[in-house]
Image (cartoon, rainbow, N blue to C red):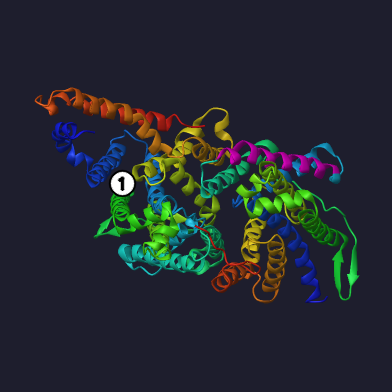
């Protein structure tokens, strides 16, 4: 077994999960200037819905995921439509606290709606792996890596090449001005929240086979995704994605070669120390507020 | 108000002056709380209820620290539970393992979390405010793992056991520990009151309206944010030590993110920048699920209910009552104040205002009763 390539490939798989979750956080941040702390919990809720539908109805996994897309999109939509956009006078801190409150709501609701028994969700591709040099990688891992990269790349294309992407970037750059230019910023924000919900759900479905679907199964993903945003900086869409893969790789190697128990914690410390030297993240520019 | 009406109102305010003094209010509040253990010993209050109330007071101490942070500087900390847990384990380690006694254990539980808080603050507060939330989440995750893994310090998931401390040569028990908690709370309330009415408070107020303007006025923004955060961690450490001394055990799973979120909920529900509001918020968030919701017929058994309760309250309060319970109390009190003010104005200056205003204390009492009614009837 290759002791470098093997863990590297495995990190890429988890990195994809973190990247999707981080993308959800960053797209909400860029359009609404709110740190979306409930991203993981909403992903957990929609992911649990997928597992519930899959286990109860016996429909194929991809159909269950489609149900999940609808649920997650609707949740994101609802949160923005019913709560966030009604808070015109609240500061962004107030909105962030709302997302913190939503964590608790979704955490409390999931067992009530989907039952308290831990659910299982299978991999997309049940078995089979391929040798890559001296390392092995399962088809499912390849699928996850490719899927993560494709979703991220698709999102970048969407942001850079389409009219909708232009609207999102304009909203992200300056919401009031964008609105004055005739961009429907409210719709853009609504879409951003719905998209964040879907991305969180996809991350949940991808990480679910490695664990059981309980209310806490997205905690690590949520925390790591936030750190990925910090590491990559909040100014670009690609920064958090790079940060997510970086955290996955570094974390995995720390766990393997330094300490299996303290690997994650060491990495958190490294991120904190990193912040000391590059407070705006890898790709961040200095943030200046105009008066 | 015209000058003449102020003059007529003065005798009243001089009569009520001691009651208006915040420190006197805190002391009276503390004295009333000290009656609870007596009541419990007389059989008028269940011991379990007394314990629940003790935890309310402990959480109130922690939440007051967070209120300084959130209410005055708009900073979110997601690491509160980690710091409270650290305080608890330090208190246990110094009291039971090193046998250094109550005071040194308390000191350790105050100093170390504060130092760590300072470090976290220095690292994260230089950029955007929201970085503190993430950095404190970071440190909380590290602490939680430490609690689980560092067996010699915490006994891991098996849980650390402790005993009631000996204070001033006196072996404490449930009732005396309750009184100690009350004393700590009153001291914390006073310190908080003085802090926000002192230089720090003025600086934080200025920063709240405009950070840039504050900076231009020569306020060192970083310094005051750092001070607010370290004070919050200090309170958290104190809360942790009291938690341990009262419960005499600590398990790592207690100190998770949801405890931090609950503390935030207490501050939000109680009302930002309100001291009594925070205590009321702690009561609503911790005691109502414990004493009321659990006993409800059908939904009482639902495991996630306290979470939903706190979460929905956070959302509802921010959406509809940004001032929280404090705002509700003001709303209830306002008609009575207006009544009192009108009467002062209507009465001839020669009339003796204290007599004409004598009915007001019962009115104020009714306002307080309404306030508690609102507070307890609020479950969403």
Report which residue position mark 1 lands on: B175
The picture quadrant where one finds residue A74 is top right
Residue nearer the viewer, B34 or B167: B34
Instruction: Specify start and end residues of the magenta stretch as a single range.
Output: A63-87
Looking at the picture, how far across and down is residue B19, in whole percent?
A: 21, 39
Please determine whether, in this image, residue A168 is positioned above or below residue A237.
above
Q: Give the residue at x 56% y 74%.
A: A277
Q: Chain of mark 1?
A: B
Judged from the image, the secondary structure of the residue bearing numbered disc 1 is helix
Please determine whether, in this image, residue A172 is positioned above or below residue A288.
above
Please determine whether, in this image, residue B315 is positioned above or below residue A11.
above
Residue nearer the viewer, B213 or B248: B213
Q: How many marks?
A: 1
Q: Is residue A85 rendered magenta in the image?
A: yes
Q: Report if residue B244 is visible in the image.
A: no
Q: Is residue B80 rendered magenta in the image?
A: no
On the picture, is B99 further left or further right than B311? left
On the picture, is A15 further left or further right than B368? right
The picture quadrant where one finds residue B371 is top left
**Quadrant placement of the N terminus of chain A:** bottom right
In the current view of this chain or complex, which residue is farthest to the front?
A: A181
């Amino acid at each position: 077994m290759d002791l470098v390539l093997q863990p590297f490939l495995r990190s890429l798989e988890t990195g994809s999960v973190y990247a999707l979750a981080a993308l959800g956080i960053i797209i909400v941040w860029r359009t609404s200037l709110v740190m979306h702390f409930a991203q993981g919990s909403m992903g957990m809720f929609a992911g649990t819905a997928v597992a519930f539908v899959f286990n109860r109805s016996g429909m194929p996994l991809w159909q269950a995921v489609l149900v999940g897309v609808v649920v997650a999109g609707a949740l994101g939509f609802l949160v923005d439509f019913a709560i966030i956009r009604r808070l015109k006078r609240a500061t962004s801190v107030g909105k962030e606290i709302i997302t913190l409150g939503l964590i608790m709501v979704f955490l409390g609701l999931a067992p009530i709606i989907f039952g308290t028994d831990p659910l299982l969700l299978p991999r997309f591709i049940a078995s089979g792996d391929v040798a890559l040099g001296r390392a092995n990688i399962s088809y499912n891992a390849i699928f996850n890596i490719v899927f993560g990269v494709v979703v991220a790349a698709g999102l970048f294309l969407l942001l850079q090449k389409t009219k909708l992407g232009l609207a999102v970037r304009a909203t992200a750059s300056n919401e009031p001005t964008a609105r004055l230019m005739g961009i429907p910023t409210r719709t853009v924000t609504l879409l951003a929240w719905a998209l964040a919900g879907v991305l969180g759900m996809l991350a949940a479905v991808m990480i679910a086979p490695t664990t059981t679907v309980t209310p806490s199964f997205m905690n690590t993903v949520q925390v790591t995704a936030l750190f990925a945003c910090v590491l990559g900086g909040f100014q670009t869409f690609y920064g958090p994605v790079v940060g997510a893969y970086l955290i996955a790789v570094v974390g995995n190697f720390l766990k393997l070669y330094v300490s299996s128990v303290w690997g994650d914690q060491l990495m958190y410390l490294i991120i904190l120390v990193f912040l000391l030297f590059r407070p705006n993240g890898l790709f961040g520019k200095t943030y200046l507020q105009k008066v | 108000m015209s000058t003449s009406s102020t003059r007529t109102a003065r005798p009243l305010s001089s009569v009520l002056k001691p009651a208006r003094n915040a420190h006197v209010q805190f002391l009276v509040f503390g004295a009333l709380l000290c009656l609870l253990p007596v009541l419990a010993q007389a059989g008028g209050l269940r011991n379990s209820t007394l314990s629940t109330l003790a935890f309310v007071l402990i959480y109130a101490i922690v939440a007051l620290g967070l209120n300084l942070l959130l209410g005055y500087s708009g900073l979110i900390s997601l690491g509160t539970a980690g710091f409270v847990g650290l305080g608890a384990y330090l208190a246990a380690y110094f009291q039971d393992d090193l046998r250094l006694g109550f005071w040194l254990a308390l000191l350790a539980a105050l100093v170390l979390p504060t130092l760590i808080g300072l470090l976290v603050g220095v690292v994260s507060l230089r950029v955007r405010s929201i970085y503190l939330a993430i950095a404190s989440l970071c440190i909380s995750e590290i602490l939680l793992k430490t609690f689980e893994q560092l067996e010699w310090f915490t006994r891991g998931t098996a849980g650390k056991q402790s005993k009631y401390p000996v204070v001033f040569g006196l072996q404490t028990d449930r009732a005396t520990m309750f009184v100690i908690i009350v004393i700590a709370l009153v001291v914390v309330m006073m310190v908080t009151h003085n802090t926000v009415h002192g230089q720090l408070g003025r600086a934080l107020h200025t920063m709240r309206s405009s950070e840039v303007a504050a900076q231009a006025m020569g306020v060192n923004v970083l310094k005051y944010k750092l001070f607010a955060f370290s004070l919050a961690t200090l309170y958290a450490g104190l809360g942790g030590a009291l938690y341990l001394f009262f419960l005499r055990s600590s398990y790592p799973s207690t100190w998770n993110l949801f405890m931090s979120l609950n503390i935030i909920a207490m501050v939000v529900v109680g009302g930002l920048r309100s001291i009594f509001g925070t205590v009321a918020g702690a009561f609503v968030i911790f005691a109502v699920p414990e004493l009321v919701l659990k006993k409800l017929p059908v939904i009482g058994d639902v495991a996630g209910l306290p979470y939903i309760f706190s979460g929905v309250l956070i959302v509802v309060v921010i959406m509809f009552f940004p001032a929280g319970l404090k705002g509700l109390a003001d709303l209830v009190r306002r008609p009575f104040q207006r009544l009192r003010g009108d009467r002062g104005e209507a009465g001839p200056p020669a009339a003796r205002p204290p007599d004409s205003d004598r009915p007001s204390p019962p009115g104020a009492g009714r306002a307080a009763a309404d306030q508690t009614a609102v507070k307890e009837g609020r479950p969403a």
